[in-house]
Image: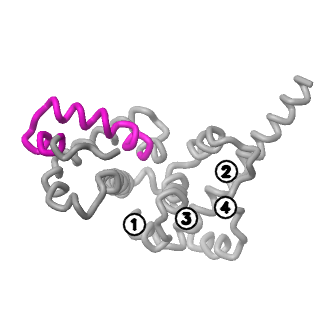
């Protein structure tokens, strides 16, 4: 995704047709980011629209530095920052963890980062969507977006240890969900044989 500067200039001048063109060009990219964090499609679309609003609102600041920052990275940062702000504002996304749980999980080995090739991408995405919201947020920020636990902690208003616990729980839950998919696939293959 790399819109023409002329299109961005028209957006800065509040050209509604340009806004629509840019929306269409950005839609898949922003939707993919929002979808990783929201299960509910309405929440996802609401976040997408707010992110797009922020992009249009701040297009002038992007144009002043566009030679240094690719448009795709700039929009990605806006999307992630918006989603993180929403997590901070909405306390229902925060799972409370007892301090004693943190030390227990810190001492346990983490489950493997890579999944075997027998699971396709769609099954992994479905499994990630089944994670509790905070676990999914930490998993996405750490594994997909490359944040460190200290950064995640600051972004979400939790400690880095709590971030590690949520990542551990996410990986553990994903492993269980993927094992269930494998078992179901194995049973289906036996029935069809």
Find the residue positioned furthest to the top.
Answer: 192
- Circle 1 crowding by C-alpha within 10 Å: few under 14, some 14–19, many from 20: some
> Based on the displayed image, in which of its 4 quarters is residue 190 positioned?
top right
Mark nearer the N terminus (3 vs 4): 3
Mark 4 and mark 1 residues within 8 Å of each other at the beta carbon = no
Q: Is residue 95 left or right of residue 13?
A: right
Q: Secondary structure at mark 3?
A: loop
Distance from disc 3 to disc 4, alpha carbons, whole Å, reads: 23 Å
Contact check, label 3 and label 1, Cβ < 8 Å = no
Q: Which residues are magenta?
A: 7-33
Q: Earlier in the sequence, mark 4 or mark 1?
A: 4
Q: Decide: marks 3, 4 in contact (CB < 8 A)?
A: no
Can you say which quadrant of the picture contains the C terminus?
top right
- The residue that appears at 60% across and 72% down in the rendered structure is 102
- Pointer 3 local density, CA inside 10 Å: few below 14, some 14–19, many at least 20: few
Counting from the top left corner in percent of width and height, residue 105 is at 66, 70
Which of the marked residues, 3 or 1, is nearer the chain's N terminus?
3
Label 2, label 3: how many angstroms apart (C-alpha)? 19 Å
* First reached walking from the N terminus: tag 2 or tag 3: 3
Residue 117 on image: x %, y %: 74, 48
* Residue ID for mark 2: 174
Q: Which residue is mark 1?
A: 157
Q: Is residue 130 magenta?
A: no
Residue for badge 3? 97
Q: As drawn, is 59 to the left or to the right of 158?
A: left
What is the spatial separation of the Cα atoms under label 3 and label 1, in whole angstroms?
13 Å
Prevailing secondary structure class for the magenta stretch in the rendered image: helix
* Image position of 168 with respect to 107: above or below: above
């Amino acid at each position: 995704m790399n819109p023409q500067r002329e299109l961005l200039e028209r957006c800065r001048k509040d050209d509604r047709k340009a806004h629509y063109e840019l929306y269409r060009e950005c839609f898949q990219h922003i939707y993919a980011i929002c979808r990783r964090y929201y299960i509910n499609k309405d929440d996802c679309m609401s976040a997408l629209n707010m992110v797009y609003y922020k992009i249009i609102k701040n297009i002038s600041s992007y144009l002043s530095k566009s030679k240094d920052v690719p448009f795709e990275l700039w929009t990605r940062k806006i999307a992630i920052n918006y989603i993180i702000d929403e997590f901070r504002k909405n306390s229902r996304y925060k799972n409370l963890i007892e301090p004693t749980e943190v030390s227990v999980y810190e001492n346990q080995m983490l489950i493997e980062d890579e999944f075997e090739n027998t699971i396709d991408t769609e099954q992994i995405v479905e499994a990630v969507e089944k994670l509790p919201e905070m676990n999914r947020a930490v998993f996405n920020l750490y594994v997909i977006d490359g944040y460190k636990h200290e950064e995640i902690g600051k972004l979400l208003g939790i400690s880095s240890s709590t971030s590690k616990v949520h990542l551990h729980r996410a990986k553990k839950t994903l492993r269980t969900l993927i094992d269930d998919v494998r078992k179901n696939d194995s049973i289906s293959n036996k029935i069809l044989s």
